[in-house]
Image: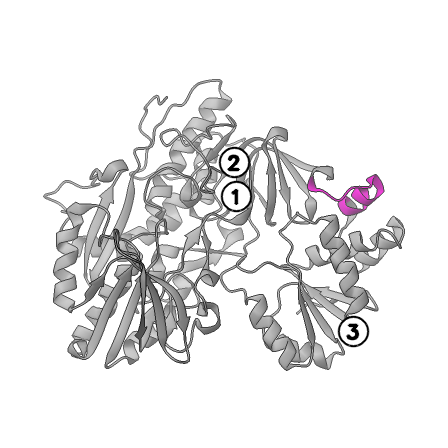
Amino acid sequence: MDIKKITDGLSVSGQVQLDDMEKLKRRGFRAVVCNRPDGEAPDQPTHEEIAKAAQAAGLEFLYLPVTPGMVTEETADAFRTALTELPGPVFGYCRTGTRTTTLWSLAMAKDKSVVDILAATKAAGYDMTGVARRIANGGVTPTDSVEDAKHEVVIIGGGAAGVAVAASLKARKADLDIAIIDPADIHYYQPGWTMVGAGVFEPSTTAKTMGSLIPRGVHWLKSAVAAFEPQNNAVILDGCRVVKYDRLIVCPGLKLDWDKIDGLVETLGKNGVTSNYRYDLAPYTWELVKGLKGGRAIFTQPPMPIKCAGAPQKAMYLSAYEWETRGVLDQIDIQFMTAGGVLFGVKDYVPALESYVERYGAHLNFFHNLTAIDGPAKKATFAISIPDEEPTEVILDFDMIHVVPPQSAPDFIKVSPLADEQGWVDVDQITLRHKSFDNIWSLGDVMNAPNAKTAAAARMQAPIVAENLIADIEGKGPQAGYNGYGSCPLTVEKGKIVLAEFGYGGVLLPSFPKWLLDGTKPTRKAWILKEQILPPIYWKAMLRGREWMAKPEKVSAK
């Protein structure tokens, strides 16, 4: 913890961990206030976990979540009341401490002068100039913020899509003024986590520092987005800073809704509960697979959409292959529980997958959705929703369970003017341009085109968005169209992959001629592509603006 004292009664810091509660007690704090909403980061403890640890340490706890940039008068008043009623001194935290400090500044506006507020926050290392201006103007809403920055192109998200499209733009127009907004320090190669969970990749090979990947000449605004004001060509950041743009690209990725499954958060990473959808949990998957000699192994898949729809069964196939290799497969009851009604959405690949399901003796359970999990008791509850039948549920014991969480657009996208009725960024599925705002584009997992949400899809989309945005700058119409391409290398065993490549409507879009690589069948060539070729392509080509096998088709779209 980097604890910063605001007043004698309040100190703040960024995100804390469970074992910090005892340390806070020893330092004399008597209460803890959490201002960070759950689910902002994959490795962030929930407020319930922190509350339990705080109470165990003899500290009072209050959960007062604040969406970045969305500090209201009501929240500030609630914080003021908390500081009055909680035993002091109080310790508050959010992601960086900024939201907590902002709350305090607004809460104290009635009692302290702007000068005193600025002095106290500056001494603690926080710049509350924007908040002070708002206090002086008598308002606390994001739209009252003063313009802090302006760029020709602003990109929301520094993941695969964001860095790739920035690099593609720079490759076309080197002098373009671009800013990427992302609070993360680490950039992850998420397609590699399946391989980590199978003991093929080391976790460290799937992570690099964000700063090392931002293209040369691109500004990195290390902050979270709070809201959009497209009518003003503005983005509101954490702390209510405003960033203006001429053109905006939105690609923040998906939100993993771990807390939508009752009891899951408390048991992840222990009690045999794991997931390859998190960097820190994928190694635990491999640990469980190596250690299991008998019993029941469950693999779950939630309702669509999710990142890489094949990933849930990839974990099953690779685990089963390991058990087969060690001669214990016949001692393990493998259950694949999917909320959907098919094994894979593109029928051409299903026969090959079904042959592996049969080979490994796995049981397919369609329309089964995980709703609750009791880790210590090793029991999982599934809602069964078979069409034209009454809903039921079943509770299964397990020795190991690989969980894929429900997924959705981030909250700041869902509530924004950019979203459709389901909460996804509303784009034309060919040009990837927003349907209502002509200077906004989107790509990656967060937009509503009906394509597979994979890194391979983002690799194809980035040059298309770059091409069309540059054309817009030059006063031209859209120059490139997206055909819905996505790829899912289905790892059916160590050494063989079914390479699924398809576009809109399930149309097959193979990258190689059939005589060289038949994607509908398990091949060693596809495994070599996944293990040895795709990672370098990701790091050294896709994120560097080198569009190998991803040149956009020159298609004028409506």
Q: What residue is shown with label 1?
A: 413
Q: Can you tell which quarter of the image residue 446 is in?
A: top left
Name the residue that disc number 2 marks: 418
Compared with 159, 88 (above or below) is below
Task: Give the numbered dot on residue 386.
Answer: none
Who is closer to the viewer here, 224 or 389? 389
Q: Can you identify the residue that label 3 sits on? A: 87
Circle 3 Cα neighbour tier, 10 Å, few/some/many (<14 / 14–19 / ≥20): some
Pick whichever of labels 2 and 1 is earlier in the sequence: 1
What residue is drawn where x is 32% and y is 41%? Answer: 451
- The amino acid beneath tag 2 is Leu
Up-down relation of residue 126 to residue 166 (above or below): below
The mark that comes first in sequence, 2 or 3, is: 3
Read off the magenta span. Answer: 130-142
Indicate the amino acid at tag 1.
Ile
Q: Nearer the viewer, residue 92 or 516?
A: 92
